[in-house]
Structures are given as structure tokens and as C-alpha cells.
Image: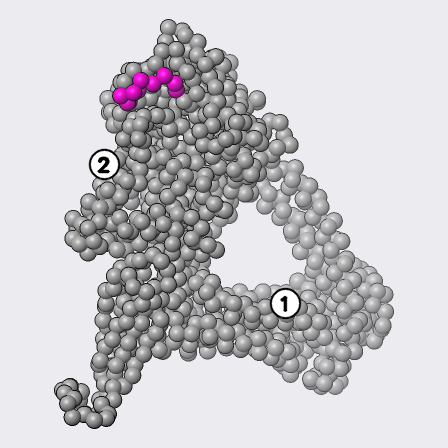
Amino acid sequence: MKIIKAYKSGLKTSLNSLQLITIGYLFLLIPAFFIALAYWSSFKSAIGNFMSPGNLLNGFDYSAFKELMRFEGEKISAVTSQGFLLVIFYVFVALFISGGIIFSLNNKNSKSNLLSVLTGGSRFFWRFLKLNFYSLVVHLIIMAIIYLPFAILVISSFESAATEKSTFFLFLPFGIFHLIVMLYLFTINNYAKFALVHNNSPKVLSSLWTAAKFVTRKFFNTYSLALLLLIAPIIFLLGYFKISGFLEMNSGLMILVVFLVQQIYIWLRMACKVWFLSGQFEYYLMNNRED
Amino acid sequence: MKNKFYKQSIFFSVIFLLTTLSAFSIQLTPRITNYKINADLNTETKIITGQMTLSWRNPSGDTVSTLQFHMYLNAFKNTESTFVKESGGQLRGKKIDDDDSISWGWIDIVKMEAEQGFDLTRNMSFIHPDDDNVNDRTVLEVALNKPVLPNETITLNIEFVSKLPKIFARTGFSNNYFLVAQWFPKIGVYEPAGMRFAKKGGWNCHQFHGHSEFYANFSNYEVDITVPETFVVGSVGSLVNKIYNLDGLVTLKYIATNVVDFAWTASPIFEVVEDNWNDVEIMVYLQPEHAYLADRHIESVKAALSYFDEHLGKYPYSTITIVDPPISGAGSGGMEYPTFITAGSFWGLPAGLRMIEMVTIHEFGHNYFMGLLASNEFEEAWLDEGFNTYFEGRIMDDAYGKNRSFIDFGKFYFGDRVFQRLGYTGMSNPKIAEVFRYAWEYPHGGYSSLSYNKTATWLATLEGLVGIETMDEIMQTYFERWKFKHPCANDFIEIVNEIVPKNLGNKYGENMNWFFDEVLYGSNVCDYKLAAISNKSVKPPLGILDDIIERPDTTAEGEKLYDSKVIIHRLGEVIMPVEILIHFDNGDEVLELWDGKSRTKEFSYERTEKIEWAKVDPNEKITIDINWLNNGKTLKPETKVAWKYMVNFLYYLQNFLQTLIFFA
């Protein structure tokens, strides 16, 4: 089965791309760390010599938290708004990193390093930006098509509904259908990126159209592969929730332990991203070789 | 079918006889009013056709020549009623559907006859005692042909028609669900001189307002409700008879004694779950899709019954009915009538979000605060809502744990009383008004924050000051003295002033009037701040020391002596006696008491130990203090909290960014 081969190949590539994963992880850690450091400083300053915030170490004290935010929150909110600006900025950084990763995966012969990520990111940034814009427009149109009948149904049924349960079950098929379509569009978007990088094509719309045809033609395989590639991140997510549920950050040591667990999880998420892309890219290449 | 009919008839006849005998033999109230009502509900037109026999006894020494009635369904008649004007046509997020003509509700008296058939219908006129809204039709005055003499009873036969509104608030219909409240002409309360704040005898009959609707005599009700036999009916009081008519309708007879109101519900799809607590029958009328949530209603109402029984007084009725409205009739949820409450549930509501429990406990509590201690909600909403909110918090914390009684999701949790306090202290302007005012006179949304939350918070402060045992004694005395009566602020304050000095001597002065002046009649806030801690080493005296008497050195060799100080500021205008806990670096602790009167207070110590931290009100008794953050100060701040929140902030930010990368 091609998809199994692609899946395994993706895993192998990601295991061999520890440097690439770590570069991606550092792209996440460094800017976030600076904001977090400012957050720590403002939080520490907000706490000052007050005693009640100390209750937030062993468990949670809603009064202490609310009053800290109410009376000293301005110091903290200034930093959280910086975090928001970083998120906006990171929409573009994310495109850059994606370009860098796919470029590195495409150049299997040369070693993936910071230079290859920077080269790929800068070379394909504008093309990826256009591609994501088009994908977003398509997604919005499809969302409107999905949710318009849902809204009409909800409005017409609400008056006679006894409880919110029926509304939920009315929403469920629309929601599930939306998730299915979203993954389909997401897969097309990825294959369009592979086409752009692999062919070094400047034609964004044409690549998107080619990818749409490719994914639709091989719908079962591309979709199955995408679902297969989602298993690992979901397992990691559940594992993280399970572990973090047991860990109380009530001492310096425990804070350090949780920090390490969180960073391992973030690193694994980045590894999953590389696995996802390399698995799909491998499938794309297999079919391209045949074509 | 016939056999079933006979069996049911015999069964209900026996019940009726027993209930009537027992009900009328227990006279708990002054028995001023009795109602006998026949009500036919047309489920298609949403109209109730009613005949009512009302007897009213003049409880005063006055000669009364007019009667006043609540005609509260007229609040839903048009956009000109005081209720719609005050509420802006929306309440608790629900809006009136003014596009649909069936949305409006009204009540008309078709005929009113006094004894000997004297027609009073032409003597009726609408009055508006609370405002100058001439278009409000919620209070009716009737001039009598013959005045009612002191202690004399008048009997009226009244025919009325009530059109139920489409539910957006409190009462009405939604499709085939009916919550029938404020549906019949209910006589006002005639207050003789000396009762509550009355200087002379007169009617106390307020218009229907956005925030208040309860003040009525304790009455006996005998109500026959006729509905299609496919409907399930629940009501105030007890079902004593059920007759299947030949036209597909069923007539249910309910009896309720010593209650201040009568409401009922009907729907063809209710699922009824029954249980018992001691001799109280619990009935939950649920939407079928909510049936699995019945236990949450039942357990919470049992917790309330048990807590009230132990800490306030016995629940005197034999039933409690809980109604769960459909989503389209959610505006009728969270309401209270004697022995009959509406709660509300939500399919899929997680167990850690205790909304069902909180609403059920709160509404049940109104059986005590309003139902039994029948204060005037229009004039003293806080005496009803605030006291009930205070008990709701106590019950929630007792039943579900102090720190997790309201929200309980793993590492995020808080208790109901915490939520109540923050509802007041978190107001953008907690000085907006004093609590003691008419319900419709609270400015700019201050009604719920002040009458519910501030009152519950200052009651918790009173509890903190006097202790839980004394507080329970106060509340129990209030209950025993005023149950089945109409208490007011003065009656409660009088009891506090009686019990606190009895139990605590002069600890808080001759009486507690100062407390009520601050929290009830005043709008100022309480805020004590631990302003500074200092530890200075005591140096040997310098200069010309000829006539200086040296103090004996009590320190061991190598030990230093410190002049340590704690300074407290009173930032708010409200004065409360407070405790201050001072902790020294060897673990010693000193608890100081301060009357809290001056603007600043200093405590000094000369010891070999340094002060490490100090805290005003260490046991958080003064819940009315609007800022607990500034209550404590430490010279060794807990820096790990900042690390904890920083690490989590970093993690969530990275996750968010990573999600962007995933989709990019």
C-alpha cells in the first residue's frame, strides 16, 4: 500500500530530521520565550509583596486571581497584548517556516539546517501567502454553503425545540461535514505547496488547481493518509493531558518538571508537523514519479 | 376505563377529604384571604377562563371602602406597561417577541359581584401607585358598595379571562408548555397602622415591575384546573382530585394552604420523577431530554431541605415541585412560588458546572425568604433575594465543598460564596447606591449586584463577626418569630440587636446599628490595606548620655534587637473591627484586634525576631472588604507563582503558534 509506505517514509524522514525539527521548535520557543519572560516580569511586579497570590501556588484561588487581575492586571495585560501582536506576526512566520520545512524535505541530498530553512522560507513566502489566501477564501465560501442551511434549520426549529439537545444533533452532521471538508481543503493546500516547491513553480492558482485534481482523483488514499498522520498528534495530545493532570505545579521542582514535559510535547508536535508534511510529500513524489 | 375512573375517583376523594381536613385544621397564618378558583385552559388560544370566589377579612381597625388587586398579566399587554418600560422588553437575555400578536398577555375581569349580587364591575379603575404611568394596568382598584368594617369579611365572586403571553419572562406559554403565574386577580395587602413601615392603614399593592412581583397575604387556595387530558400538570400545593371529563378534558383539584401565591404548569411532554425527603414529596417535571438530569435537581433540593431544616427551620409543606422549562420557554426558568419552583437544565451540562444545583437551591430557598418570611419584595428586595443568596452560598458550600461548590473543573475551581462576593466587590462602582431602596429604584443595573450579592456578602461579614452559632441563632429567631408573617428591615435588625449583645456582650457596642448603617443604609465601601512592614535594628543610644536610663539588655550574646512595625490604612469609609495577624521569622504569631476606626494604625514590637509577614483579617471574616489583595504583605514574596504562570503562558502561546504553523 502506497499510503503505508508514505506513512513509514514520513516517520523515517522525521526521525532523520531532528535538526530540522529542533530548528522549527526553536522558531517557536525563542519569540514566545521573550514574551513569556516579559510576562513573568510583569506578573512578578503585579504580585509584589502581596500575600494572597501565594495561594495560587498550591491549587487555585479565584478571589486572589480575580483581584490580582482587577487591581494589578494592567501590568500583565500590557504583555498579553504583546503576545497577541506576536500571534498576528506569527501568521507570517508560520508560512515562512512551512516553506522552509518543505524546501528542506525537497532537498533530500543536502542536510537540513537553518540555512535551508531560511532559504526555503524566503523563496516561497509570497507564494505560500497567496496560496493560503486563496485557500482561506475557498474555505469561507464553503463554510457559508455549509452553515447557511444550518442557520435556516436552527431558526425554524428553535421555536418548537424542547431542549438544546435537538439543536446540537442538528449541528452535529454539519459540524462533522465541515471537519471532513476542512481536512480535504487542508490536504489540497499541502499538495499545492509540494507542487510549488518541487516544481519551483511561480503559478499559485495553477498549483492549487492541480493539487485539487490530484487529491480528488486519489481521494481515498490522500484522505486516508491524512487521517493516519493525525493519529500520532492526537495520541501525544491525550498523553500530555493524562500526564499533566497528575502534575501539580506547587514547588520549584514541579514547575521545572512540568516545563520540561510541556516543551517535550511542543517538540513532539513539531516532529508531527514534519512527519505529516514528509509523509504527504513522499506520497506526492511517488505519484509524480509514476506520472 | 370506567373501572379506572371509579378507582381514581374514590382514591382522590379520600385524599381530598384527608388533605382538606388536615389543611384547614392547621391554622398557621392570620387567614386573611381565601381563594376558590375554577380555571379552564384553552391550550390553542392560550386563554384561561376563570371563576373565582374570594373572601377577604379586614385585618385592621380601619373601615375599608376600596379593594386593590394585582392584575399582573397586564404587564405583558403592550409596550407601555411599567414592566416592559423598565425591562426594555427583555429580561435575563430573553426578548419579547413583539412581532407576533399572540405574544401579548392580559387579564380582564368580566364580572365582579359582592354579596347579594351587587355588581362591582363598573366600580373598577386602574391605578398606578408607583409611578405616573397612566398606561399601566397592573393594579386595579374597586370601590365597594358597602365598606368592610374592622375584622369583617367580604366575599366576592369574580369572573375573569387571562390571555397568557408568549414566554420571555416569568410567565406564559411556549408552544404546548405553560407556566401559569400571576394569572388571576390577586388581592393586595392591607397594612394596618404599625405593620412594617405603615404609619396609617392602607393598601400595599405595587405595580408589576422589572425586578419585583411578590407581596401578598398568606392564603388558602382551592383550585380546579381543567386542561386536555394529554397534559401533565404540576402546581403549588397538593393534588387532591382528578376527574376525567367526557370531552377529552381533565379537571385537577389542588389545595394549597398558608401560601402567598398560586402558580402551575402544564405540558404534554413532561416526564415526572418523584422522590421523598422525610415527609416531603419531591416532584421534578422535566423535558424528556433532560430526564437523566433529574438526580441533580433532586439531590440539590434534598441538600437544601436538610440544610434549612438544621440551620433555619422546618419546611412546613408536604410537597416541592421543580419545573424544568423547554429552551424556548427558558424565560420562565429560575422562578419561585410557594412549594413550586422553576429551575432549568442544559443537556450535556458537565457535572463540574453546578448551575442546575445553584438555581434549584436558590429557588427552593425562596420558600423561606419570601414564601414563609413574606417580606415585601418591591420595597425590600434584599430581604428576600439577598438573604436567600446568602443561604444559597452556605448550602452550596456545605453540599459540594467550600472551594469547588460552583465551578469544579480539575485545576480551575471556585465556590459559590466566592462568586457572590466578587459579584459585589467586582462592580465597576460598588458605591452606586445603598441596598435599602425600592427594587425598581436601583440605578444602572445595580439591582442584582446590590440586592443579591452585596446583601449576601454583608450577611457573610456579620457571620464572620459574630460567629456561625450566633448567626444561626439570629436567623432561627428571625424565622421562628416571623414565619407566616411580613417582616421588614427593622424586625431583622431588632433580632440582631437582641442576640449579639446577649451572646457577645459589648464586643461590638450596645447594638449593631452601626453595622446596618454602613452596609444596608449606606453606600460606602470597606477597604483595609496592610500598608507597610518594617524591621529596623535597634542601635545603642548615641550622644551625651549622662541622664539616660539604659534599658536592661535581654538579648543573648550575638542577638540583634529589632524595632518592627506594621502599618494599616483604612482606605474605605466603612468602619469594621478587624483582626491583624503578625508573623515573625521564628514562626511566632501575634493576633491583634483593632476597632478599625482611625485612618491609620501602627503596631510596634521590639523583639529579636523580624516580622516576616502580616495580614489584615486573616480569616477572611470581613467579606465586604472590596480588596483582599492589599490585605496581606510579606517581605518574602512567593516568586514561584510568577514562574508557574509564566511557564503555562509560554506553553499556551507556543501551542497557539504551533497551530498556526500546522495550518500554514
Residue at the image position 49 percent from the left and 14 percent from the top: B110
Q: Quadrant of residue B356?
A: top left
Image x and y of residue B572, in percent: 37, 60
Residue B536 placement: quadrant: bottom left
Q: How far from the left and from the top, in percent, is residue A72?
A: 47, 67
Q: Amino acid at mark 1?
A: Thr
The reply, left or right, for residue B473 in relation to residue B233 is left
Frontmost residue, B165 versus A218: B165
User: Is residue B121 shown left or right of residue B318?
Assistant: right
Look at mark 2 in the image and give the residue it sits on.
B481
Q: Which one is earlier in the sequence, the residue at label 2 or at label 1?
A: 2
The quadrant the C terminus of chain A occupies is: bottom right
Q: Magenta stretch: give its range.
A: B58-67
Total numbered badges shown on the rendered structure:
2
- Residue B528, image x and y in percent? 34, 63
Q: What residue sits 31% from the left and 17% below the top? A: B63
Q: Quadrant of the N terminus of chain A?
A: bottom right
Q: Nearer the viewer, residue B159 or B10?
A: B159
Q: Name the residue carrying label 1.
A: B659
Prevailing secondary structure of the magenta residues: loop
Q: Secondary structure at mark 2?
A: helix
Instruction: Identify the residue at image location x=83%, y=62%.
Output: A209
In the rendered structure, which amino acid carries the disc numbered 2?
Arg
Q: Name the front one of labels 2 and 1.
A: 2
Q: Which chain does tag 2 point to?
A: B
